[in-house]
Image (cartoon, rainbow, N blue to C red):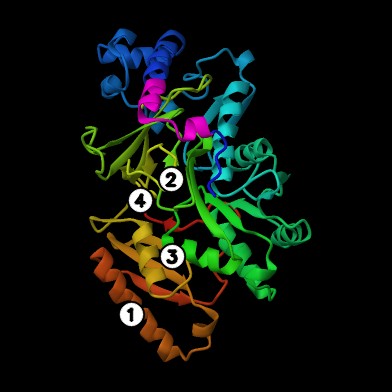
């Protein structure tokens, strides 16, 4: 049976959702015009005033906001409330350049936790559940967001944060945790460790997992589900918009419902910025219509995906986004060819390898090189060297067919690629570009 945290919102009619969006967008545009000089200047540069935005149909007129704007306005340039009204900051986990710092009023935190509570209930969570939150806490949004959502649902919450895998497993078993929240790569690692301890899925109390903060494939989902004996749900979010819970999967597991009472989603052509018709693949853009402290209008996420309004068997009426199919910026350009790490992962999983790999890009004598290091399964590791060399050749051919360029493949011993307790480091780009 499908469970909802706020059924009157999650199953609202299209007309009702549009009415909320129109009213909140108009208010938000006025808010940034009045309180954020940086935005006002961007709007004036396009010859706009708040009177030009009467509802969602005028959204396309507004200027985009990008990560560059956030860096330029750092730290306080996009804050729309006096600092005495703000109660928290969160920050991105990224390491390049200035970090993104997002601000929250208490009301912002309440709404964010509501979104995470919706995700937990969509995964079957109730106040009878024990929810282990193994996302990082601190500046990273994963831990605090799902911690708050878990409290709102009324779950017994275990705030383990990430790391110390033995302790994680001890708590899952001793406290009979039923829901696990962490990154998919960490869930796979926990599953791998449990398997090594000789635990079978029916000896693991977990029934559901809520995994996000990094890209993961359908094959990886199946793998985690089988190892832990759970149903694995996707969750999506960005620090810039609040954190996890911008969208989440329901029991259908065919995409994530966007919380449209808080966020308006558009799909644009990443090159021209033009809004694309429904069902097109393009870059995802979000406008936050209920945020008080740090409202972003038309924020370019760089995530490539498709939106769908097909009715969902779960009864929720909010638009669905597919799993991001790559990014318009973490795309690697190698010898002039666009390569997404997700394409490489798809080939590896299709060929029966686990999703433990690293992509190493370098430039030797002015020519790009691409090497994929892949962990063997324990069965393969016992094979003779000639068999390993044959497997490497097969992967080289499969990658060439997918990418159109040659990638060197090196099969390495099981467990030799460093495990990450946060986001997995998949790409090492040594080129000085």
**Dot 4: element:** loop
Q: Earlier in the sequence, mark 4 or mark 1?
A: 4
Give the residue drawn at x 36%, y 40%: 302
Give whichever of 96, 168 is nearer the camera: 168
Label 3 crowd bin: few (<14), some (14–19), many (20+), radius 10 Å:
some
List the residue tagged with mark 1.
394
List the residue tagged with mark 2.
256
Q: Which contiguous range is marked in magenta?
A: 7-21
Q: As drawn, which residue projects farthest toward the front?
A: 1
The spot of residue 197 in percent (x, y) is: 70, 73
Contact between labelled residues 2 and 3, with CB atoms less than 8 Å apart: no
The spot of residue 418 in percent (x, y) is: 57, 64
Label at residue 219: 3
Q: Earlier in the sequence, mark 1 or mark 2?
A: 2
Label at residue 353: none
List the residue tagged with mark 4.
326
Give the residue drawn at x 71%, y 61%: 169
The spot of residue 122 in percent (x, y) is: 54, 45
**Alpha-carbon span between mark 4 and mark 1:** 25 Å
**Dot 1: element:** helix
Q: As drawn, which residue projects farthest toward the right?
A: 174
The answer to whether 115 is drawn above or below residue 63 in the figure is below
């Amino acid at each position: 049976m499908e469970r909802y945290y706020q059924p009157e919102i999650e199953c609202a009619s299209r007309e009702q959702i549009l009415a909320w969006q129109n009213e909140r967008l108009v208010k938000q545009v006025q808010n940034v015009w009045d309180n954020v000089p940086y935005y006002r200047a961007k709007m004036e540069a396009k010859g706009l005033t708040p009177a030009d935005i009467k509802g969602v149909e005028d959204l396309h007129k507004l200027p985009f906001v990008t990560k560059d704007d956030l860096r330029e306005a750092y730290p306080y340039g996009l804050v729309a409330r006096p600092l005495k009204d703000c109660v928290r900051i969160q920050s991105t986990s990224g390491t390049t350049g200035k970090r993104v710092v997002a601000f929250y009023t208490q009301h912002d935190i309440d709404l964010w936790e509501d979104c995470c509570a919706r995700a937990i209930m969509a995964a079957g969570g109730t106040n009878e559940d024990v929810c282990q939150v193994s996302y990082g806490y601190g500046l990273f949004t994963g831990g605090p967001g799902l911690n708050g959502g878990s409290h709102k649902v009324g779950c017994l919450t275990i705030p383990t944060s990430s790391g110390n895998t033995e302790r994680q497993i001890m708590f899952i078993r001793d406290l009979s945790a039923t829901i696990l929240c962490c990154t998919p790569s960490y869930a796979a690692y926990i599953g791998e460790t449990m398997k090594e301890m000789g635990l079978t899925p029916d000896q693991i109390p977990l029934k559901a997992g809520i995994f996000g903060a990094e890209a993961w494939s359908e094959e990886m989902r199946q793998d985690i589900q089988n190892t832990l004996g759970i149903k694995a749900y996707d969750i999506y979010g960005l620090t810039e918009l609040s954190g996890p819970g911008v969208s989440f999967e329901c029991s259908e597991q065919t995409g994530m419902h966007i919380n449209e009472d808080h966020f308006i989603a558009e799909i644009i052509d990443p090159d021209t910025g033009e809004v694309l018709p429904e069902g097109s693949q393009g870059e995802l853009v979000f406008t936050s219509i209920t945020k008080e402290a740090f409202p972003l209008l038309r924020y370019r996420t760089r995530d490539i995906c498709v939106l769908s309004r097909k009715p969902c068997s779960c009864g929720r009426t909010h638009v669905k986004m597919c799993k991001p199919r790559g990014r318009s910026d973490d795309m690697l350009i190698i010898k002039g060819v666009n390569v997404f790490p997700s394409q490489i992962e798809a080939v590896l999983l299709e060929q029966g390898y686990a999703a433990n790999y690293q992509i190493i890009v370098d430039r030797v004598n002015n020519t790009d090189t691409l090497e994929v290091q892949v962990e063997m399964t324990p069965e393969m590791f016992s094979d003779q060297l000639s068999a390993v060399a044959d497997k490497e050749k097969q992967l080289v051919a499969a990658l060439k067919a997918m990418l159109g360029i040659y990638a060197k493949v090196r099969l390495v011993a099981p467990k030799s690629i460093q495990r990450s307790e946060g986001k997995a480091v998949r790409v090492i780009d040594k080129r000085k570009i």
